[in-house]
Image: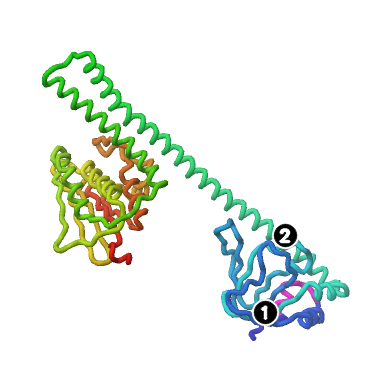
């Protein structure tokens, strides 16, 4: 044992000023114990009465910050000591001490220490000094802990404030997105009721009214779908994602043509695996990705939907070559209250619920959703779903 690990060297550091014979008496009143890694020596908030000198091995000192987090305060090694305050008062431990390796300890109990204290004035003086020093340290630790808690509280408050602002902006967007088609539909209905239109004008008014009502229904359905999907889990069945992808591309063909965007589908060679899920929800998730890709693509752009897979997994990719996504907002694009209103001179309508819907659906299907994007070059969204046969 090296000199700095010897009890005769550790005790004077713990109790400065005590006499050599008192050091020897403390050693003789102590016991040596070897414990394995993972042994809890001191329990935070427990009233314990043992002082430890670490002759060999390492321990870590931690403090509970909340019910789920333990903060590491320090690491102690051979030659260090801890728990001396337990010898002089019945206050709970301030931290938890756990061995990280096999450790050799010299342990002194309060009863033995009290017997020495009765006839050793220098030990009593040393303890007074130690108490004063430790109280100062505890005050500093308490101040640091309060500072850290204040920072955590400020960060939580800032996050809540941002969420509240986002919700307000979302509600404003809802009002705007609903008001415009409602006013348009209402205005045309009033004209139709008065019988002021005929021929081509009548048909155009009916078409416009129908289009605005469909937009209202779509917006409301998106909002309700997000609420319902969290509460009601549909019954899963084997699903052919190739058929779903074909349906989505077919349904959005005219929209792509109107936006002057080329929409393509590639399913590769061979049969792709089925997945277990709800076909309507999965179609809605893929629809949202295709809709977004077309919306954010420039005229003459391309949107490519591709599927590939094996007996373990099916991968669905939706790639566009549009405006891309700024790295700063990339983590927020799946939030239900976030949406892009403008990029350069382009204005984008909608509530931005599509990506939130996609993420929620894929999570309920135990899949994953990834995105890669470069501003000005486009985005690639990839869905990973486990093959139905792989679940057996």
Under circle 1, the secondary element is strand
**In the figure, residue 175 lies in which quadrant?**
top left
Q: Which residue is mark 2?
A: 135
Q: Is residue 155 above or below residue 210?
A: below
Q: Nearest the camera: 289 or 313?
A: 313
Q: Is residue 14 magenta?
A: yes
Q: Is residue 350 visible?
A: yes
Residue 237: x %, y % from top left: 30, 56
Under circle 2, the secondary element is helix
Q: Is residue 228 above or below residue 206?
A: below
Q: If you read the primary sequence from the N terminus, does the residue marked by circle 1 or circle 2 appear first?
A: 1
Query: How many neighbours does mark 2 have within 10 angstroms: few (below 14), some (14-19), or many (20 or more)?
Result: few
Q: Is residue 375 visible?
A: no
Residue 301: x %, y % from top left: 15, 45
Please, which residue is most extreme toward the bottom here? Answer: 1
Q: Which residue is mark 1?
A: 105
Magenta span: 9-18
Q: Mark 1 to mark 2: distance in Å?
A: 25 Å
**In the figure, residue 165 lies in which quadrant?**
top left
Residue in the image at 33% along x and 40% along y: 339
Residue 11: x %, y % from top left: 73, 76
Residue 216: x %, y % from top left: 29, 32
Q: Quadrant of the N terminus?
A: bottom right
Q: Marks 2 and 1: in contact by CB < 8 Å?
A: no
Q: Is residue 377 above or below residue 345?
A: below
Q: Is residue 271 magenta?
A: no
Is 263 positioned to the left or the right of 114 in the image? Answer: left
Q: Magenta span: helix, strand or loop, mainly? A: helix
Q: Nearest the camera: 350 or 37?
A: 350
Query: How many neighbours does mark 1 have within 10 angstroms: few (below 14), some (14-19), or many (20 or more)?
Result: many
Residue in the image at 36% along x and 39% along y: 224
Q: Is residue 327 above or below residue 81?
A: above
């Amino acid at each position: 044992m090296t000199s700095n690990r010897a009890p005769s060297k550790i005790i004077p550091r713990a109790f400065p000023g005590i006499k050599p014979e008192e050091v020897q008496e403390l050693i003789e009143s102590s016991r040596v114990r070897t414990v394995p890694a993972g042994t809890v020596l001191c329990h935070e908030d427990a009233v314990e009465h043992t002082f430890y000198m670490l002759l060999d091995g390492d321990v870590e000192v931690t403090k509970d910050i909340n019910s789920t987090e333990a903060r590491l305060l320090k690491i102690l090694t051979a030659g260090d000591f801890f728990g001396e305050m337990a010898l002089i008062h019945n206050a709970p431990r301030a931290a938890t001490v756990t061995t990280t390796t096999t450790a050799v300890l010299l342990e002194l109990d309060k009863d033995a220490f009290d017997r020495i204290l009765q006839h050793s004035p220098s030990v009593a003086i040393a303890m007074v000094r130690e108490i004063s020093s430790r109280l100062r340290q505890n005050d500093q630790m308490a101040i640091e802990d309060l500072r850290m808690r204040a920072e955590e509280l400020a960060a939580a408050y800032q996050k809540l404030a941002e969420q509240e602002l986002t919700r307000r902006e979302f509600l404003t967007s809802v009002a705007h997105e609903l008001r415009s088609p409602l006013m348009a539909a209402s205005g045309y209905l009033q004209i139709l009721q008065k019988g002021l239109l005929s021929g081509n004008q009548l048909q155009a008014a009916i078409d416009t009214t129908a289009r605005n009502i469909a937009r209202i229904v779509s917006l409301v359905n998106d909002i309700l779908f997000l609420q319902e999907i969290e509460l009601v889990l549909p019954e899963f069945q084997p699903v052919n994602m190739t058929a779903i992808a074909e349906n989505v591309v077919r349904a959005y063909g005219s929209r792509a043509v109107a936006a002057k965007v080329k929409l393509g589908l590639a399913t590769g060679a061979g049969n792709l695996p089925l997945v277990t899920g709800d076909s309507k929800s999965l179609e809605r998730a893929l629809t949202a990705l295709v809709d977004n890709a077309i919306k954010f693509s420039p005229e003459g752009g391309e949107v490519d939907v591709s599927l590939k897979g094996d007996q373990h997994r099916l991968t669905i990719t939706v790639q566009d070559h549009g405006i891309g996504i700024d790295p700063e907002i990339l983590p927020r694009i799946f939030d239900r209250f976030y949406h892009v209103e403008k990029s350069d001179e382009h204005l984008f309508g909608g509530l931005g619920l599509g990506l939130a819907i996609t993420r929620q659906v894929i999570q309920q299907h135990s899949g994953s959703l990834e995105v890669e994007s470069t501003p000005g070059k486009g985005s690639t969204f990839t869905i990973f779903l486990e093959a139905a046969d792989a679940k057996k």
